[in-house]
Image (cartoon, rainbow, N blue to C red):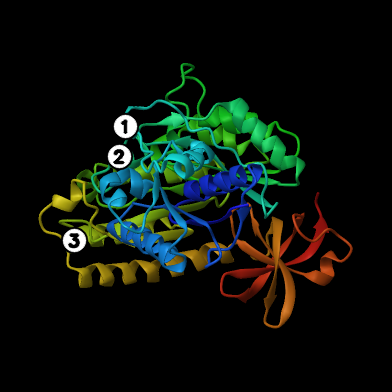
Amino acid sequence: MKKVALHTLGCKVNTYETDAMEQMLVAHGYEIVPFDKGADIYIINTCSVTNMADRKSRQMLHKAKKMNPNAVVVAAGCYVQAAPEEVMADVGVDLVVGNNKKKDLIQILENYFVEHEMENVIDIAHTNEYESLTVTKLSNHTRAYIKVQDGCNQFCSYCIIPYTRGRVRSREFLDIKTEVETLVAQGTKEFVLTGIHLSSYGVDFKDKEYGLLQLILDLSNINGVERIRLGSLEPRIVTEEFVKTLSQLDKFCPHFHLSLQSGCNETLRRMNRHYTAEEYYEKCELLRKYFVMPAITTDVIVGFPEETEEEFKITKEFLAKVQFYEMHIFKYSKRKGTRAAEMPNQVDESIKTKRSNELLALEKQMSEKYRTYFIGKEVSVLTEEKAIINGKEYMVGHTKEYVKVAIDMDLIHGMDKENLIVTGILGENLEENVYLLKEIQKDS
């Protein structure tokens, strides 16, 4: 029995695909072991979103070969897709598996051991096939990430992903439904829909009426699904019909990660983002029209090529105007192969750091303000794991808005403590960003 160790770099989609590969390996008699010296095969599911991600991917591949020079080191995923010749020329790599080939992992390994065939990469830009991968078992039964879509058609000027993931391909509902029902039977209550460009779900279907909204509605009808949460969205999907319909679903979590990147229209134009700051703000106001204090989170890039002090100031003022729950702040990083990497007037790293620190300070203020709104309010919490806070044991989970909450173990004595949905009044802050739930009662 061959021992296999897996390691994931990058996004939730990569994590999902690694889980699926692991389950395929187990089903075919391979033994999964920790990522240390004891493996016969190392599989690194790589990331290529930035040059730094490429470097981290190479480092993990070399680390695997160093731990066991006799092992088969497999490079899989986006870095392989972005630079197949470079990866195959790496002496630390024995086998490459591109995107849309992970589903064939078992056959690829068997072929390698017989014929030592190294390359397994397709022209990802010219496939309409959604890669059939399925997760049937989770180590954590509380929350499941469900991949429903792959690829992107947006071609933002800083992004390599359309070249590594190909065009939009959507997963059929019946396939999603089967996976969700399998996980529900194991006790999973919350499902997070994820994809490379989730908002594009269904645009490649013959039935143009079937999109993300209908998928959410259909999943909400599955018995045992208690919560549905969404991954990152593009602002344009936020329409009156979309928001009004979701606001009527008890199972829907009002947590919207709306990708922004910049609050300055000139910067957005150079990024090739397909909206203005004014349009983005209208979408946020629409969410607040139908939901009480929805969690609106976002991504922001600082130091994009040609970003002036005035443009940064406009962005900062816009962020303060929107009042986000959380912001992920990224310093612009060149990505070879993108238009932005060749743009003039690249911003100095010290300026990027200064701007990033300013926005991180703003983010901390806004996040604290958002969380404290819920003190004294009744909230619903899905318990996830035990934690020791200030020397005392609690069950920790999240509200629908993804506010982190701790529950005194004595208050849920006699209940199944994990994967439990409880309601109660949110109390004081126990430690940074963790709030106490008090006066609880069992909800489900």
Residue under pointer 2:
163
**Along the line of sight, which residue is nearer the eye, 278 or 329?**
329
Residue under pointer 1:
125
Could you tell me which residue is drawn at 28 percent across and 57 percent down?
51
Q: Is label 2 or label 3 in front?
A: 2
Asked if residue 160 can be seen in this view, the reply is no
Q: Looking at the image, is mark 1 or mark 3 earlier in the sequence?
A: 1
Q: Is mark 2 in CB contact (under 8 Å) with mark 1?
A: yes
Could you tell me which residue is drawn at 31 percent across and 32 percent down?
125
Residue type of the residue flagged with mark 1: Ala
- Give above or below for 119 relative to 61: above
Give how far apart the Cα atoms at labels 1 and 3 are: 38 Å
**Residue 429 location, quadrant:** bottom right
The secondary structure type at the circle numbered 2 is helix
- Give above or below for 155 relative to 141: above
- Name the disc covering residue 392, or none: none
Judged left or right of residue 225, residue 96 is: left
Mark 3, Cα crowd under 10 Å, few <14 / some 14-19 / many 20+, is few
Judged left or right of residue 375, residue 263 is: left
Mark 2, Cα crowd under 10 Å, few <14 / some 14-19 / many 20+, is many
Give how far apart the Cα atoms at labels 2 and 1 are: 7 Å
- Give above or below for 224 relative to 208: below
Give how far apart the Cα atoms at labels 2 and 3 are: 33 Å
**Along the line of sight, which residue is nearer the eye, 40 or 101?**
40
Residue type of the residue flagged with mark 3: Glu
Asked if residue 367 can be seen in this view, the reply is yes
Could you tell me which residue is drawn at 30 percent across and 57 percent down?
301
Residue under pointer 3:
310
Residue type of the residue flagged with mark 2: Tyr
Q: Looking at the image, is mark 2 or mark 3 earlier in the sequence?
A: 2
